[in-house]
């Protein structure tokens, strides 16, 4: 898991990935209480930028900024930090490129402060796969309870916290709710996003009871939250005056760069990549919400694709029958087999096997056959744990047997990688190439044959007895799995508490634990 990053300078901490919401203090919002049009200050409604005339999204953000930036010690500190470390924002601005237009569009549609588009810089450094020590995940750093509360799905196949379009909608829903619950004050709402609404409301009440000021700057809040809001305001100030401060932000065209395509059925991600004329790695990078080799059997059935690939994909998809979008294996049940072991061996779930075979129970009989959905691509591309992505390790892997391949007429890196069950990233790393390198007929390439499945993963099921002070997040972190996986393996819900002495089942990868 990715731990929250704190860059410590002069006794202060620069926060990234820092959401620590009070999971038990948010009550479910009622639809009639959230009326954005009535609660947004009029100056937001009156000063919308003429976005159609703007060519760069950063300029669109600058023109839409409205939150006052006060002369405060922490605001000045963070402003100075960003100015002294220009590379930080330069790198993050490149990472934000695929998503920033989408976020700004959603903010303007809801008439919300444009500065909110900068929150993912603080929360996750615009990394959709980011995870924190507090078990928060994704661009907006949702914890599991908060994600469920605001409608994000999480299961063995899919984690909506890492789905950028879905999590953006959920994050803005949450911020609208917090704005409504915190006296229509955006500084309160942003603080509550970090620490929970109850902490902010209790701090306001304490000051009221003492006859003290109740503006954000006068509240006694957790140190992290006291720095969180100033950091956002400082960031807005630096983005607004980036040229003056000598900071170069990667240009982001003021038009869609990605499209969410509805597929309407489960699909193997390797097949989807081929239909879009992309590598599997490129597709997974835009769709980090998918944990496995395919989209979830019961949905969501959507993919994020580059805008220039979407039409090609839709045409190819229309020519592919739903039944052909996932590969199937006919498996003969052996004596001693269990449906759980079969599912684990083939990187799928018990429910998926049962659904494919019309089974009403987990009972199986030796000698009979099962139809099993399987990946069409190298299973090294898909991790058993959402926190351990094998593609990141694969590029430097040198295990396995080396072979030399001579390039033929018409060969591409993608085709060669597919034929040898490796990734383009591996192939380019082994041969010191870039993904855009042009191949020459007769050129020799080094290929490392993939290690055996036994070498890739050493998966086993273990039992763990809950100790006093344990939490699902702590246990998940210890065994390098996710809370969502723990919930599924033990038929638990996010609202259930675990008790000392309770025995939990875990499916662990021993190679991860020994790493």
Image (cartoon, rainbow, N blue to C red):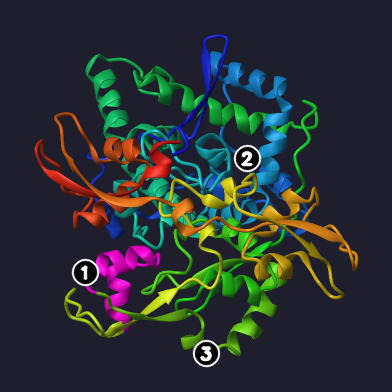
Q: Nearer the viewer, residue 161 or 271?
A: 271
**In the rendering, which numbered label is found on residue 495?**
none
Query: Which residue range is magenta in the image?
Result: 335-356
Is 240 placed left or right of 72 in the picture?
right
Badge 3 crowding class, 10 Å Cα cut-off, few under 14, some 14 to 19, many 20 or more, is: few
**Mark toward the viewer: 2 or 3:** 3
Q: Which residue is mark 2?
A: 65
489 falls in the magenta region: no
The image shows residue 89 at horizontal and vertical percentages of: 68, 34
Depth check, front residue: 322 or 123: 322
Residue 279 pos. (x, y %)? 66, 65
Q: Give the alpha-carbon distance from disc 1 to disc 3, as whole Å.
A: 36 Å
Q: Which residue is mark 1?
A: 336
Q: Residues under labels 2 and 3: Cα distance?
A: 48 Å
Q: Which element is circle 1 on?
A: loop
Mark 1 and mark 3 lie on one chain; the one further toward the N terminus is: 3
Image location of residue 135, percent across then percent down: 36, 39
Q: Is residue 177 above or below residue 270?
A: above
Up-down relation of residue 360 to residue 149 (above or below): below
Identified at 80% across, 52% down, the residue is 434
Q: Earlier in the sequence, mark 2 or mark 1?
A: 2
Q: Nearer the viewer, mark 1 or mark 3?
A: 1
Residue 270 relative to residue 368: left or right:
right
| Residue 349 visible (yes or no) | no
Q: Which quarter shows the C terminus? A: top left
Residue drawn at the location 31% of the way across and 69% of the way down: 342
Earlier sequence position, callout 2 versus callout 3? 2
Query: Which residue in the structure is indicated by mark 3?
Result: 321
């Amino acid at each position: 898991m990715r731990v929250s990053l704190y860059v410590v300078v002069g006794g202060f901490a620069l926060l990234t990935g820092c959401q620590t919401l009070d999971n038990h203090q948010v009550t479910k919002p009622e639809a009639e209480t959230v009326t954005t049009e009535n609660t947004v200050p009029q100056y937001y409604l009156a000063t919308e930028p003429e976005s159609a005339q703007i060519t760069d999204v950063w300029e669109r953000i600058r023109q839409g900024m409205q939150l006052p930036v006060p002369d405060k010690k922490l605001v000045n500190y963070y402003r100075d930090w960003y100015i002294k470390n220009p590379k930080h924002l330069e790198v993050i601005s490149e990472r934000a490129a695929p998503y920033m237009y989408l976020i700004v569009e959603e903010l303007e549609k809801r008439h919300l402060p444009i500065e909110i588009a900068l929150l993912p810089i603080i929360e996750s450094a615009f990394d959709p796969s980011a995870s924190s020590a507090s078990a928060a995940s994704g661009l907006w750093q949702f914890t599991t309870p908060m994600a469920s509360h605001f409608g994000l799905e999480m299961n063995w196949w899919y984690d909506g916290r890492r789905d950028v379009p879905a999590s953006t909608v959920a994050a803005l829903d949450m911020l609208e709710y917090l704005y409504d619950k915190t006296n229509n004050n955006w500084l309160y709402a942003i603080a509550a996003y970090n620490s929970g609404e109850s902490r902010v409301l209790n701090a306001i009440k304490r000051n009221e009871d003492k006859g003290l000021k109740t503006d954000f700057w006068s509240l006694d809040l957790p140190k992290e939250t006291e720095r969180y809001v100033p950091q956002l305001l400082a960031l807005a100030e630096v983005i607004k005056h980036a040229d003056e401060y000598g900071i170069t932000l990667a240009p982001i065209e003021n038009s869609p760069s990605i499209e969410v395509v509805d597929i309407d059925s489960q699909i193997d991600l390797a097949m989807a990549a081929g239909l879009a004329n992309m590598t599997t790695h490129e597709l997974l990078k835009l769709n980090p919400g998918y944990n496995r080799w395919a989209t979830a059997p019961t949905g969501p059935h959507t993919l994020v694709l580059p805008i220039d690939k979407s039409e090609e994909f839709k045409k190819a998809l229309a020519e592919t029958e739903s039944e052909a979008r996932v590969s199937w294996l006919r498996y003969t049940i052996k004596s001693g087999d269990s449906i759980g072991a079969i599912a684990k061996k083939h990187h799928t779930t018990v429910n998926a096997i049962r659904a494919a075979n019309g089974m009403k129970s987990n009972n199986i009989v030796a000698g009979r056959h099962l139809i099993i959905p399987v990946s069409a691509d190298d299973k090294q591309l898909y991790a058993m744990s959402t926190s351990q992505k094998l593609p990141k390790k694969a590029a430097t892997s040198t295990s396995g047997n080396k072979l030399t391949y001579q390039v033929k007429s018409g060969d591409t890196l993608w085709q060669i990688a597919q034929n040898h069950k490796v990734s383009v990233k591996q192939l380019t790393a082994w041969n010191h190439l870039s993904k855009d390198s042009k191949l020459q007929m007769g050129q020799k390439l080094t290929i490392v044959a993939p290690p055996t499945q036994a070498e890739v993963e050493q998966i086993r099921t273990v039992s763990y007895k809950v100790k006093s002070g344990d939490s699902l997040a702590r246990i998940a972190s210890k065994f390098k799995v996710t809370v969502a996986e723990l919930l599924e393996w033990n038929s638990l819900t996010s609202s259930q508490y675990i008790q000392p002495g309770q025995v939990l089942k875990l499916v662990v990868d021993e190679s991860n634990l020994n790493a």
